[in-house]
Structures are given as structure tokens and as C-alpha cells.
Image: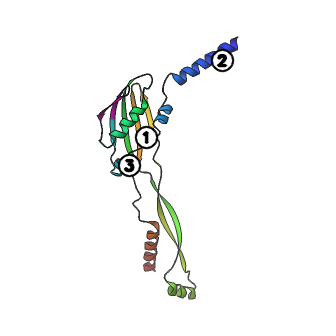
């Protein structure tokens, strides 16, 4: 009998914890399909969008015109949170630099065929190793959600940087020309 009472108590507590309030993980799953809009991302527009959610009615309070449609569509999908039908939702659209330089090495031939023949005669190497950097873009961080009573804050990240370095093959040929001039 005592074991049945314990089992029922644990089951009731688990059900209350699961169904009693909306967790941040559940909100992240609801917002998983929300992405930084492409046009504002290319124009490097970022900022906050404030939205008021009353039941199924979404009202824009403040925010950039290019970011607002994404925030309003996302707010419609939220519904009620923690049994509250009136919510103040703030979307923070933030651009982050996701690029990184990766070192690469390439082996290139020195000069033309005649110059390589001369180098062979004198026992010099006909190839050289060129050290270069290649730019790689990473993924934007996942959406972050913070609940504070009837206020909800959502951080949506976009790729803010871009590879501004020249193409690595072009850079390798430039480096080989410079090293040829230096010799």
C-alpha cells in the first residue's frame, strides 16, 4: 500500500512539472524554425522587435520594419505560455561573426620549365610550400529563450561576417610571385 502511495505521489509531481509550466526547452522547439531574415542579414540590420501577444492577436509595439514580420509570425506560433494569454515578447536580432581563418599549405612549382631545369642543374628545389589561410564560415548560434513571468525574450542570431579574404588559389599565386621576386 505504501509503495502505491509513493508511486502515485511521484507520478503526480512529474505530471505537474511537465504540464504545469512551459519550459525554455519547449519554447526553443516551438521557435526552432525561426531564422534571421535574409534581406536584413545581408543589409547588416540588427536590433530589437517588441511584440504584444494577447491570445491569438499579435501587435507590433516597436522594431525595424524588415525584422518585424519574422517576429510577428513567430509570436503567432507561440500561443499561451505558463497559462498567460497576455505576453510581452522581445526579439533580439543579433548578427555574429561566424568566420574563422584556417591555415593551409600548398605545394607549387617554382618558375617556368626553363627556370626549373636551371634549378635542377644547381641542385636547388623546384617546388616550394606556400602557407596560406582559407576563410571558413561557421553556423550561427542556436536561438536563446528567457522567460520572466509575462515577459519573454528571444535571441535570434544571424551570420554577420563574411569572408573578405581573396580566394586562396589567387592568394597562393600572389604569394609565389612575391617570393619569386624576393629570390
Above or below for 6 versus 180: above
Q: Majority secondary structure of the magenta segment?
A: strand
Residue 160 forms part of the magenta stretch: no
Query: In this orientation, which residue lies closer to the viewer: 69 or 170?
Result: 69
- Look at mark 1 in the image and give the residue it sits on: 34
Dot 2: few (<14), some (14–19), or many (≥20) neighbours within 10 Å?
A: few
Q: Nearer the viewer, mark 3 or mark 2?
A: 3
Image location of residue 52, percent across then percent down: 33, 29
Q: Which of the 4 image quarters holds residue 2?
A: top right
Dot 3: few (<14), some (14–19), or many (≥20) neighbours within 10 Å?
A: few
Image location of residue 82, percent across then percent down: 45, 24
Q: Nearer the viewer, mark 2 or mark 1?
A: 1
Q: Is residue 91 visible?
A: no
Distance in Å between CA atoms under marks 3 and 2: 51 Å
Query: In this orientation, which residue lies closer to the viewer: 97 or 129?
Result: 97
Q: Quadrant of the N terminus?
A: top right
Dot 1: few (<14), some (14–19), or many (≥20) neighbours within 10 Å?
A: some
Distance in Å between CA atoms under marks 2 and 1: 40 Å
Q: Is residue 104 left or right of residue 92?
A: right
First reached walking from the N terminus: tag 3 or tag 2? 2
Disc 3 to disc 2: CB gap under 8 Å? no
Query: In this orientation, which residue lies closer to the viewer: 167 or 59?
Result: 59
Above or below for 146 versus 39: above
Q: Which of the 4 image quarters holds residue 143?
A: top left
The part of the chain drawn in magenta is 50-63
First reached walking from the N terminus: tag 2 or tag 1? 2
- Look at mark 3 in the image and give the residue it sits on: 38
* Residue at image location 63% in from the left, 16% down from the top: 8
Above or below for 117 versus 139: below
Amino acid at each position: 500500500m505504501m509503495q502505491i502511495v509513493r508511486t502515485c505521489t511521484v507520478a503526480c509531481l512529474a505530471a505537474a512539472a511537465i504540464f504545469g509550466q512551459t519550459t525554455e526547452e519547449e519554447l526553443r522547439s516551438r521557435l526552432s524554425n525561426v531564422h534571421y531574415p535574409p534581406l536584413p542579414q545581408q543589409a547588416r540590420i540588427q536590433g530589437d522587435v517588441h511584440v504584444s501577444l494577447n491570445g491569438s492577436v499579435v501587435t507590433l509595439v516597436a522594431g525595424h520594419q524588415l525584422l518585424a514580420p519574422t517576429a510577428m509570425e513567430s509570436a503567432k506560433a507561440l500561443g499561451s505560455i505558463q497559462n498567460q494569454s497576455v505576453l510581452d515578447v522581445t526579439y533580439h536580432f543579433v548578427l555574429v561573426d561566424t568566420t574563422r581563418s584556417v591555415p593551409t599549405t600548398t605545394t607549387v612549382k617554382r618558375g617556368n620549365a626553363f627556370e626549373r631545369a636551371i634549378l635542377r642543374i644547381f641542385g636547388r628545389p623546384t617546388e616550394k610550400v606556400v602557407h596560406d589561410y582559407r576563410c571558413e564560415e561557421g553556423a550561427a548560434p542556436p536561438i536563446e529563450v528567457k522567460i520572466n513571468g509575462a515577459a519573454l525574450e528571444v535571441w535570434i542570431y544571424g551570420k554577420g561576417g563574411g569572408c573578405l579574404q581573396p580566394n586562396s588559389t589567387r592568394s597562393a599565386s600572389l604569394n609565389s610571385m612575391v617570393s619569386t621576386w624576393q629570390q
